[in-house]
Amino acid sequence: MRFNSKNILVFLLMMLITSTISAQKDVRKNIRKGNKEYKEQKFSDAADYYERAVEGNPNSKEANYNLGNTLYRQKEWDRAIEQYNQSNALEQEDPLRVSEGMHNIGNAMLQKKQLKEAMEAYKMALRMNPDDDETRYNLAVVQKMIQDEEQQSDGEDDQEQQEQDQDQQQNQQNQQQPPQDQEKRPEQPEEPEQMSRDNARQLLQAIEQDERETQEKVQQIKAQEREEQAEDNRRRNKNW
């Protein structure tokens, strides 16, 4: 039996269509299995199925996006971001889908502590979907985190500057003071002042005056004691 070239072409085309249909079925099958594992939080198994689906059809939007989510769940931030970018490239004609991908990229950047990159991703997501309140909230959070980080950095810079100023001031004081191991010249003791005759006479008179006043006070106290004693004796005599 002979086949002409036209029959051979039709046969090959039929084989190609059959193979394509079979491959598409495998892709759908792997996506369904991946979704099942994902719902059961078996993220590693889900990732395997999604990767098979992507290998079978690199242009599968669902497989690429779901693989990104699975990698995110496994904290593989870099791979998740790469997968979301691939999904966004396939979804470029659907702004809402791209917005979802950018939102997830922002989340991954935030997990990596790349605050400014996360902020830009959230802004891009809002440009694609201005009505996304969740993205708007995340954007506000990351902006606050950036502001707090900058204020903390400014405070640390101020403290560092103060410490540098103090060190500089201390160095200047140390330069003005002689080194500790340098011998100091002994100070000469001051000679006592010579007391003049007038000063001596005034001092002697003051001492004598103090002594006279002291004696007078003593005499007054003794006289008062004698008077009190006599009064006490008179009271006793009356009582008797």
Image: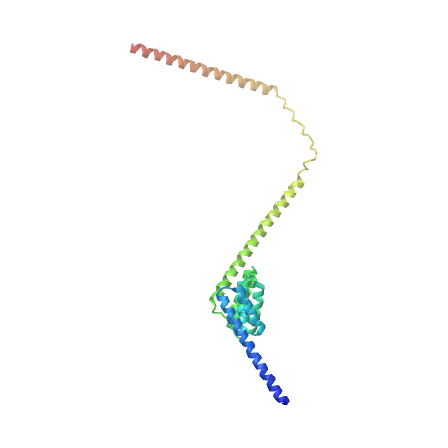
Query: Which quarter of the rendered picture does the N terminus lie within?
Result: bottom right
The spot of residue 39 in percent (x, y) is: 48, 66
Q: Position of residue 177 (x, y in %)?
A: 66, 38
User: How did the renderer colour the structure?
Assistant: rainbow
Q: Is residue 230 visible?
A: yes
Q: Residue at x 54, y 55 (%)?
A: 151
Residue placed most toward the observer, 83 or 29? 29
Image x and y of residue 37, in percent: 50, 67
The front one of 17 and 146 is 17
Task: Inspect this view and state whether residue 123 appears.
Answer: no
Identify the residue at image location x=50%, y=60%.
Answer: 141
Report the residue at 51% width, 59% height from top.
Answer: 144
Q: Nearest the camera: 160 or 43?
A: 43
Above or below, 69 against 208 in this view is below
Q: How many numbered tags mark residues here?
A: 0
Classify the position of the C terminus by image quarter.
Answer: top left
Q: Position of residue 18 (x, y in %)?
A: 56, 81
Q: Is residue 238 above or below residue 118?
A: above
Q: Residue lying farthest front? A: 1
Q: Is residue 232 above or below residue 178?
A: above
